[in-house]
Image (spheres, rainbow, N blue to C red):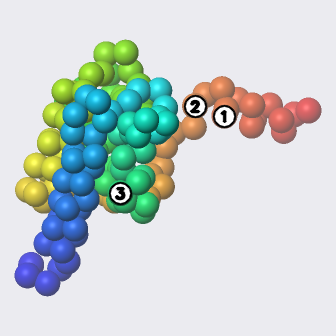
Amino acid sequence: MPFDGVECFAKENLQKIDAVIDLIGTPERWSKGRFRTPDGRYCLRAAIRTLDPSEALGPAILDAINQMAWPHYWQIERFNDSPLTNHDQVLTVLMRARANIAAGRFAATSANPVRPIPFRRWWNRVTVWFD
């Protein structure tokens, strides 16, 4: 539909994802294990948060990660910090997310997506009731 807001959403998020790609576009500007290093390198999540405080890009990037990577990841940080992940894979994921957004195939854009509770945390909550 011409006035349903999808074009505006896509254009705005394409600009944001291009800025993320520019920010961590070289291996010298990307990091693992830390959000931001003292010398100015960013991990994927930190780059998203720096350029998009609402984190509207998060679900689209996580969807692209799970389209391309095995095993599936519940968090962008896990993908970024995985020993199997390198800078080329991060850029490939960002380009896939960009292509998905441009084509109108993007994930729901909730700032706080619903994530399953890990079993240990769930068990701790349940056992508290019986103490």
Task: Determine contact: label 2, label 3, CB under 8 Å.
Answer: no
Can residue 76 be seen here?
Answer: no
Specify the quadrant of the image occupied by residue 65. Answer: top left
32 or 76: nearer the viewer:
32
What residue is pinned by disc 2? Answer: 118
Residue 106 location (% of width, % of height) = 21, 54
Mark 2 or 3 closer to N-term? Answer: 3
For the point 25% across and 29% down, the residue is: 27
Residue ranking furthest to the front: 39
For the point 32% across and 41% down, the residue is: 62
Residue 120 location (% of width, % of height) = 66, 26
85 or 67: nearer the viewer:
85
What residue is pinned by disc 1? Answer: 122
Specify the quadrant of the image occupied by residue 74. Answer: top left
Cα separation, mark 3 vs mark 1, equals 33 Å
Residue 22 in the image: above or below residue 6: above
What residue is pinned by disc 3? Answer: 51
Mark 3 or 1 closer to N-term? Answer: 3
For the point 42% across and 62% down, the residue is: 54
Q: Amino acid at mark 3?
A: Leu
- Count neighbours of disc 2 (C-alpha within 10 A) and say few if under 14, some if 14 to 19, many if 20 or more: few
**Camera-nearest label, 3 or 1:** 3
Quarter occupied by the N terminus: bottom left
